[in-house]
Amino acid sequence: MKIDLHGLELSEAIIEVHYTLEECKSDGDRLLEIVHGYNTGRVLKNYFLSQKFLKSVEKEGFRLTRQKSPNPGTTLFKILDFSS
């Protein structure tokens, strides 16, 4: 599943990603592509690459592992577990 976060503040983006993870769970989708942008999306990119993000979603029952993305403006995750 792909989510485009262009133009969102960090707090809004976090909420949208959590909703999208729930959607992935409902659909059985195991890939999440977060489009945050390259230069202007640096704050979002830094957060979604952080351990803080991975720990926050793990508390909600989602175990993610980062996948190599060919585009520096996106972050790609494989969803390992939907235990929530």
Image (spheres, rainbow, N blue to C red):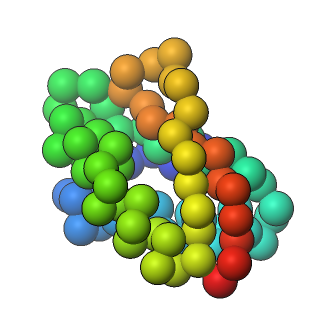
Where 79 falls versus 4 (above or below)? Answer: below
| Residue 54 in which image quadrant | bottom left
All told, the count of numbered labels is 0
Screen quadrant of the C terminus: bottom right
Q: Position of residue 63 (x, y in %)?
A: 58, 62
| Residue 18 appears left or right of 82 | left
Q: Nearer the viewer, residue 49 or 37?
A: 49
Q: Residue at x 20, y 58 (%)?
A: 9
Of the pair 4 and 72, the residue shown nearer to us:
72
Closer-to-camera residue (37/48): 48
Q: Is residue 40 above or below residue 26?
A: above
- Looking at this rendering, what residue extends furthest in the right direction? 28
List the single residue furthest toward the top: 70
Q: Is residue 71 visible?
A: yes
Apparent side of residue 20 relative to residue 15 in the rendered image (left or right): right
Give coordinates of residue 52: x percent, y percent.
29, 62
Res 35 quadrant in image: top left
Is there any visible trace of residue 6 in the rendered image?
no
Residue 46 x, y percent position in the rendering? 23, 42
Which of the two residues, 76 or 36, is positioned nearer the viewer here? 76
Residue at (52, 40) in percent of width and height? 66
In the image: residue 16, left or right of residue 9 = right
Q: x and y percent of residue 57 in the render?
A: 46, 69
